Image: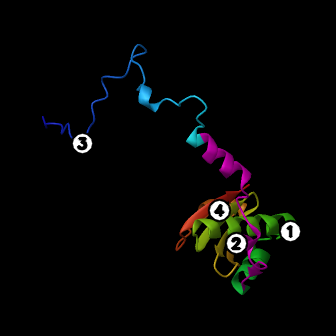
Amino acid sequence: MSKVNSFLIPNVSRLPTDTQKADPSNALKKNQASEFKGLMERELTQPQVTAKDLGQDLKVSTHATKRLQERNIELDGDEYVKLKEAIGKLRAKGGHDSLVITGKAAYVVDVDKNTVVTAVDRNNMSDNVFTKIDSTIFMM
């Protein structure tokens, strides 16, 4: 029987009990605001995607145009807005070559060039392997 390395596996057999008290030095002082609360309020009030992040108009490559036609994917206004918003979010997070999955289809986009590279309809998504992407976003 092999010996288990206790250094790699932490001992979780002793859990804190209800009678144990929290460290009082961590408690907020009177009239002291929570740092976490301030961070949360700032995050919730700031727009997640700015106009700068949206960039220029969305382009569709020749290859993507063929795929959209072959696979009967309609790139309507709602889908266009989802793709623009997704590209903005991906740009803000540092994405370059990304997979955008919507309720209708999956799109591989070049974030830096604001271009849809290819598209796969919803029914055929599971049959495909998406390579050379660095990020994925769901826009349902």
- Disc nearer the start of the sequence (4/2): 2
Q: Which mark is residue 90?
A: none
Mark 3–mark 1 Cα distance, whole angstroms, equals: 53 Å
Looking at the picture, tell me which residue is in the foreground, 57 or 80.
Answer: 57
The CA distance from mark 1 to mark 2 is 14 Å
Q: Earlier in the sequence, mark 3 or mark 1?
A: 3
Q: Earlier in the sequence, mark 3 or mark 2?
A: 3
Q: Where 18 sits versus 74, above or below?
A: above
Tell me if residue 89 comes above or below residue 17 in the rendering: below
**Front position among marks 3 and 2:** 3
Q: Which residues are magenta?
A: 37-61
Asked whether the residues under the numbered discs 3 and 4 touch, taking CB atoms below 8 Å apart as contact, a structural biologist would say no
Residue 38 in sight: yes
Q: Position of residue 70 (x, y in %)?
A: 76, 76
The spot of residue 30 in percent (x, y) is 57, 28
Image spot of residue 140 (x, y percent) = 74, 54
Evaluate whether residue 106 shows in this view. no
For disc 1, the marked residue is 76
What's the distance in space between the residues labelled 3 and 4, CA to CA? Answer: 40 Å
Magenta stretch contains residue 118:
no
Quickly name the residue at label 4.
125
Residue 119: numbered disc: 2
Single out the mark in the foreground, 3 or 1.
3
Query: Going from the N terminus, do you reach mark 1 or mark 4 first?
Result: 1
Nearer the N terminus, badge 1 or badge 2?
Answer: 1
Which amino acid type is shown beneath numbered disc 4?
Answer: Met
Q: CA distance from mark 1 to mark 4?
A: 19 Å
Report the amino acid beneath label 1: Asp
For mark 4, give the secondary structure. helix
* Mark toward the viewer: 1 or 2: 1
Q: Earlier in the sequence, mark 3 or mark 4?
A: 3
Per the model, the C-alpha gap separating discs 3 and 2 is 45 Å
